[in-house]
Amino acid sequence: MINLALFEWGGWNRPIPPLTFGDKNIPWETEIKYLGMTILAASRFTICLHRAKIKYFQCLNTILGKIGDVHVVGLILSLIASNCTPVLVYGVEACLLSKAQLLSISYAYNAVFVKLFKSFDVKTIRACQFYTNFLSAEHSIGAARLKFLSSLSTGTDSPAGFLCKAVGAEEVTQLTTKYGVRLPATNRRIMRQVWEVFENEQND
């Protein structure tokens, strides 16, 4: 049995005649799951972060419940980084997030720091992240994006590499200007530049 569904980008929310396959109607869907991500029908490429955040908080609460003692900061943050954060940011290096989406991820990402360091002040939380050797959500995603785009820039023979060159130049320029790095670059070079930017923010 073959399951079929249709999905639309670009002309979203316009009337579209129904399609059939044989004697069966093919439904139009508002979202699809692909490679572990939920892609939404919209006027531009966008993903749904809701399920990832639910799984992240479930994982986070499980770890905090098992440990119990919130004073073992190093252990908790290490476990969160290994088991929870990858769930939250899975696949986002390949997506251009909106400001609202980045804020949504940052809110979830910061939750454990808020609980451990008992502060809601954004500047304080970012300082706690820096001095515990963790990037902020913004810079962690920025580093992942740079690594992803750097790998694409070295493989222009692939469809993804071609598209990166053809339509991704503006985003590449924004990121490389922000972090002062030229692509292609090694992961070590990218991380050094991202950490340098994050460190300079602590002195502002």
Image: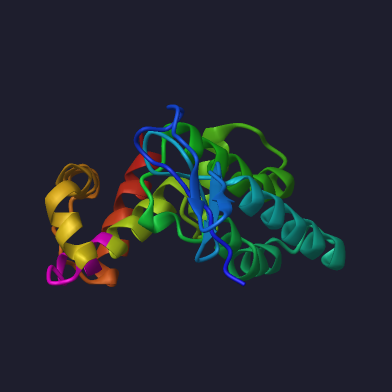
Q: Nearer the viewer, residue 98 or 4?
A: 4
If the image is split into quadrants, where does the C terminus sit? top left
Q: How is the image coloured?
A: rainbow
- Range shown magenta: 149-158
> Residue 190's image quarter?
bottom left
Identity of the residue furthest to the front in this view: 23
Residue drawn at point x = 38 percent, y = 51 percent: 95
Tell me how many marks there are. 0
Would you identify the image quadrant in which residue 45 lies?
top left
32 sits left or right of 179 in the view: right
Quarter of the image for the N terminus: give it: bottom right
Question: Which residue occupies the foreground of this view, 130 or 63?
Answer: 63
Please, is residue 88 above or below residue 7 in the view?
Answer: below
- Residue drawn at x 73%, y 58% as measured from the top left: 60
Identify the residue at image location x=30%, y=63%. Answer: 148
Q: Is residue 192 in sight in this rendering?
A: no
Q: Position of residue 57 (x, y in %)?
A: 72, 53
Percent position of residue 70, x then y: 79, 57
Is 204 on the left-hand or right-hand side of 57? Answer: left
Would residue 157 be counted in the magenta stretch? yes
Q: Residue furthest top?
A: 14
Please tell me whether residue 38 belongs to the stretch shown in magenta: no
Position of residue 47 in the picture relative to residue 142 (left or right): right
